[in-house]
Image (tube, coloured by chain):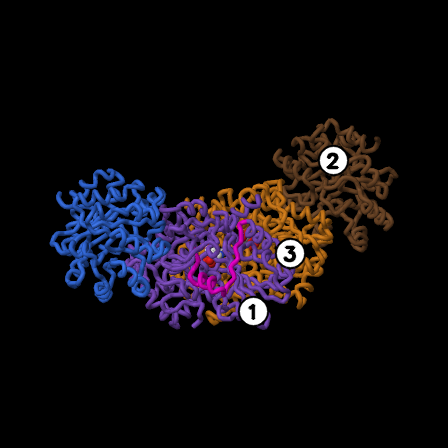
Chain colours: A blue, B brown, C orange, D purple
Amino acid sequence: MSKRISELFDTDKKLVSIYFTAGFPKLNDTVKIIEKLEKSGVDLVEIGLPFSDPLADGPTIQESSTKALHNGITTELLFEQLFNIRQKVKIPLIIMGYFNPVMQFGVEAFCQQCEDIGIDALILPDLPLREYQLHYKEIFNRHGLDLIYLITPQTPEERIRAIDQMSNSFIYMVSSSSTTGAKAGFSEENQEYFKRVEEMKLKNPTLVGFGISDKNSFDQATSHSQGAIIGSAFIKHIENKGIDQIPSFVLNLRHE
Amino acid sequence: MSKRISELFDTDKKLVSIYFTAGFPKLNDTVKIIEKLEKSGVDLVEIGLPFSDPLADGPTIQESSTKALHNGITTELLFEQLFNIRQKVKIPLIIMGYFNPVMQFGVEAFCQQCEDIGIDALILPDLPLREYQLHYKEIFNRHGLDLIYLITPQTPEERIRAIDQMSNSFIYMVSSSSTTGAKAGFSEENQEYFKRVEEMKLKNPTLVGFGISDKNSFDQATSHSQGAIIGSAFIKHIENKGIDQIPSFVLNLRHE
Amino acid sequence: MSKYLADENGYYGAFGGAFIPEMLYPNTEELRVNYLEIMERDSFQKEFKYLLKDYVGRPTPLYYAQRLSDTYGTKIYLKREDLCHTGAHKVNNTIGQILMAKALGKKRIIAETGAGQHGVATATVCALMGIECVIYMGEIDISRQAPNVARMKLLGATVRDATSGSKTLKDATNEAIRDWINNPVDTHYIIGSVVGPHPYPDMVARFQSVISEETKKQLLEKEGTENPTHVIACVGGGSNAAGQFYHYLDREEVNIIAVEAAGKGVHSGESAATSALGKVGIIHGSKTLLMQTVDGQITEPYSISAGLDYPGIGPMHAHLYSSKRAQFVSITDAEAMAAGKRLSELEGIIPAIETAHAFAVLEHQKFQSDDIIVFNCSGRGDKDLQTYIDYFEL
Amino acid sequence: MSKYLADENGYYGAFGGAFIPEMLYPNTEELRVNYLEIMERDSFQKEFKYLLKDYVGRPTPLYYAQRLSDTYGTKIYLKREDLCHTGAHKVNNTIGQILMAKALGKKRIIAETGAGQHGVATATVCALMGIECVIYMGEIDISRQAPNVARMKLLGATVRDATSGSKTLKDATNEAIRDWINNPVDTHYIIGSVVGPHPYPDMVARFQSVISEETKKQLLEKEGTENPTHVIACVGGGSNAAGQFYHYLDREEVNIIAVEAAGKGVHSGESAATSALGKVGIIHGSKTLLMQTVDGQITEPYSISAGLDYPGIGPMHAHLYSSKRAQFVSITDAEAMAAGKRLSELEGIIPAIETAHAFAVLEHQKFQSDDIIVFNCSGRGDKDLQTYIDYFEL
Ligand SMILES: Cc1ncc(COP(=O)(O)O)c(C=O)c1O
Ligand SMILES: Cc1ncc(COP(=O)(O)O)c(C=O)c1O
């Protein structure tokens, strides 16, 4: 496990993780946003590598991806933007993207770049476990990268346990079987699911993602997990208010 | 055979027969036209009883029929218009129409009216021989009416002879297998057909109809027959020049 | 010989015959003298059956409509003529007639069309045989049935506009007949329904009779009997109905229901309900029931479905009506549209609007749970989508 | 097991698999675990075959195209999928999948559609079964395929517009997948081609394999051999091709020709010729050939035919391509349109423009007089009339 990630989870506090789309709203906002997030007290950042067809995401993230691609973001350019990032921020950085752009870049080359830059882990929602195990795990490991797995309310206990076995940092607990940005707030059912997973006492910690937009949903999400990931709500915020208002967004999540 | 018709064919001259549509161009032109035709030296008149779907006729006659119907002509009204006609004109008068209006009026009633008025014969192109013989001949004969049969270049010799046997006044020789107004002038083939029929030495005289528009075609048509029937060309003439110019139309047919 | 079929002079009881001008005599006579002999030739039957099978896609299924049956509490079968190549039963007849034309040595085909279904079916078989094809269509129909006009052109046919009269089907028929008069030797006229002078009604009915021939066999397999309790079909000219009724005509235990278009209502002045409104008369060479003025002028019919928008019915149907062998039902535009929608939603089959008229009978009449009803599902609704769209504001 | 069919993990050689987010895992897993067992059930097979026969109108004819054969000096057969209910082969698959959905206890169906053929086929089977149906369609496609949108609505389906991305098929697919993610328990997603994550490509190919199953029998009757020398089909996602090739895959003596849309020219920048332009990548859950930028962004394809306008091909076809089992041919818009017109004029069959691409091969390649060529005549051109009208100014 990446040291930065393991240290992070070694606290009691509820972790705030923010997802944003690289190259959005402006092509060169990527690094600025990461810096501002760290300064605002965010614990972990997921840098979205835009994809033309992000089928696990909702309209907000899809639109931001489309705009970022239109702005001219490419995998290569993202790596260039992140070239010096570790001289600027210390918090764990994760790249989240779809598998096709990674494949086209070359999995080996991609991992090498991540290692060089100091990326801690990857989230590739459409890279199936089996494929990963068979073909890519060895490469990832060689470059000190963790692959973060997702689980959903429909994931059977057995499979959660298997994922837990294979995971090495944290588990991304999708709040409901929903694309990002689809729901707001959590139902009883959702909460029971959080509790059920908590009671499984997995070896890895969990972060809840999807559907978290404010302090209320953040608190609900983290009552049975170690933190939560905010994506669509954050993207809407910087789109409407600009990236200078990032601190207020983060503040509002924790205090209200 | 009607006396007026038999007397007419007792001459050597080439007979001019004119077809026009009753109630056209104006509703009450019917009688005026007949009078003018007689005065102009026309030998025989066919009064067209308009029908909505005159499938043996070309566009000129169809349009005149449509207009006449629009003007308000009906079978009853035509008979009213013709009520006194025999006090005005002496030449043979024939009513030409389709069988459906006759049927709706009642064949018996229709023939009675014709007899009362002094109509000499009927041309009902869509009343088949067989039907006529079986159901209507007796009625027609009782009212002193002849039914004029048509023959065409395709009519086999045998059938021409049969028609000749059944006919009692003259045979309407359709110049080519064409709807009215379809062709202008006659081909070699046409002329051969005229000759062929002439050489059959039928008991009835023949009048040629369809495709006669001027002196030239009139002369061609009558070189092997006793006369010709002009329809579409006459209707076009009165439509364009008015009914006052009828004498000039007839003159032009004979002298040029 | 069935008393419901044509006698040798083409009469169905008091109806039928050949009321044609002498100019058409040789054409129809050639056909009259030869049609039965040609149709009975082995080579003809073989090719006809071959093309119906491999080209048209016959036999069409006799489909048990489960959800429709459940809805109306009776057993309903659909004879799926909508699955025929070109989308309706019309092609059964054009296949037969193109073979007839070939056997007679004809080099050119003409036809009339209203909605365009018969025109397309004719243009199709002419393309298949490589024979010149001219289709007459009313000027007004040409503009409102643009897709079918395009299909005919794509198939290589010439579409000629009938500009006379009301510029619709009746006038297209007049024009086609005129063309035939003017081309008596090399041209065959493919009439699209069981109308026109003898031998057309009989010939077309024979070609379409494959529908009930198949139905008998298929029903026997499914229900253990060749006979349904009811056969139901819409009647424009009456060809799909003739085909569906044919082999049941003499089986008096089979009830026959013929469905006409009442347009905006039988007595609205905008209707095509010939049996209800018509009187005996002559139309297109046949003595039959037709809509006309007291003066014997043929009137313009109206129906939302172009294929039922004809002022007459075939003489067979006039006879079935007057002999009471068939029950006639009039269905309004609104009832037909609702029935079309219902069939779409219940069975996933969007019927032609002509066909939808037949299905509307289910709302008019109660059937028993053990009745077996066969509908002629005469055509598919693809050609009618614009009407459906406009009507239901889809 | 054929080396050209999916292995138990859904791989065709290097292609296939299930590259799906975890959110879809339960849905596809449920299907993967059950589909073979369900398909093999007697009751399933019985109902599937019954509906294919009585509802869809199968077997579709294998029609010997005389005039086309004469023109090209070879023997040409057409597998008449254009005669299927709803107008194309697509319904074979939707019938299969709706029965699958019922067996899995699903209460709601979703699907994506481009030109609308698959949407109509899906809405049709949902009406047939009385199951709720939501169809995703790109906003742009909705406006250019209005008649098919109307058909779906008439059939009772809800048509939802995909407003993301390029607002066409690719995006409709994304939206449908999202819906499925959001409704993992009660909803079945009916994919319309041999694309998507395992087990879809295999399942859809099996449902479509009825095409070559019938072809074998029919050709044996007609030519005394089950094997043609060539089978030819167009490839959008590849379902009609998969069905036509299926039972011939292991018969190496049968040449397989797959036809892709070259749009305005393979290298014009407006093309959908995936095998020529694509590289290995992941699209809609499957590893296959797809058109993409060097950066792995999926590019917008272009073809005059909406059904071929897809940036990928099914993994089976990627494998057939890379293993050289099949020959791939690219056909431009202009070649396809000309081929469509030719088939219309020579055979009286107006093909879908997708299908017309396949026939254009006859102008690309010379066949021997004793070759036996089977084309999958995958669909009829009714849906494409506006395109034909515009293109040929009819
Ligand atoms: C589908 C369909 N059904 C019925 C008809 C009516 O014709 P007929 O009464 O000759 O079957 C038509 C005519 O176009 C039609 O297209
Ligand atoms: C008639 C027809 N053929 C072919 C296709 C292409 O799909 P596939 O490659 O899955 O057969 C379509 C798609 O809509 C179609 O409608």
Do pointers 2 and 3 mark residues of a single chain?
no
Outermost residue on the top side: it is: B244
Q: Is mark 3 on a helix, strand or loop?
A: helix
Tell me the quarter of the image containing the N terminus of chain B.
Answer: top right
B144 vs B82: above or below? below
- Which of A173 and B250 lies nearest the eye of the viewer? A173
| Direction from residue C107 to residue D374 in the image, left or right | left
The answer to whether the beta carbon of the residue marked 1 is less than 8 Å from any atom of ligand 2 is no
Residue identified by numbered label 1: D219
Q: Using the rendered image of the protein, determine whether residue B73 is visible from the camera's viewpoint.
A: yes
Labels 2, 1: front one: 1
Residue identified by numbered label 2: B233
Do pointers 3 and 1 mark residues of a single chain?
no
Which label sits on residue C200? 3
Tell me the quarter of the image containing the C terminus of chain B.
Answer: top right
Q: In x, y percent, where is residue B102?
A: 66, 44
Residue range in magenta is D312-333
- Which of B108 and D394 lies nearest the eye of the viewer? D394
Q: Is residue D314 magenta?
A: yes
Question: How far apart in space, not on screen, are marks 2 and 1 (Cα)?
Answer: 63 Å
Query: How busy is the neighbourhood of tag 2: few (under 14 within 10 Å), some, or many (20 plus)?
Result: many
Question: What amino acid type should be assigned to the residue bearing mark 1?
Answer: Leu
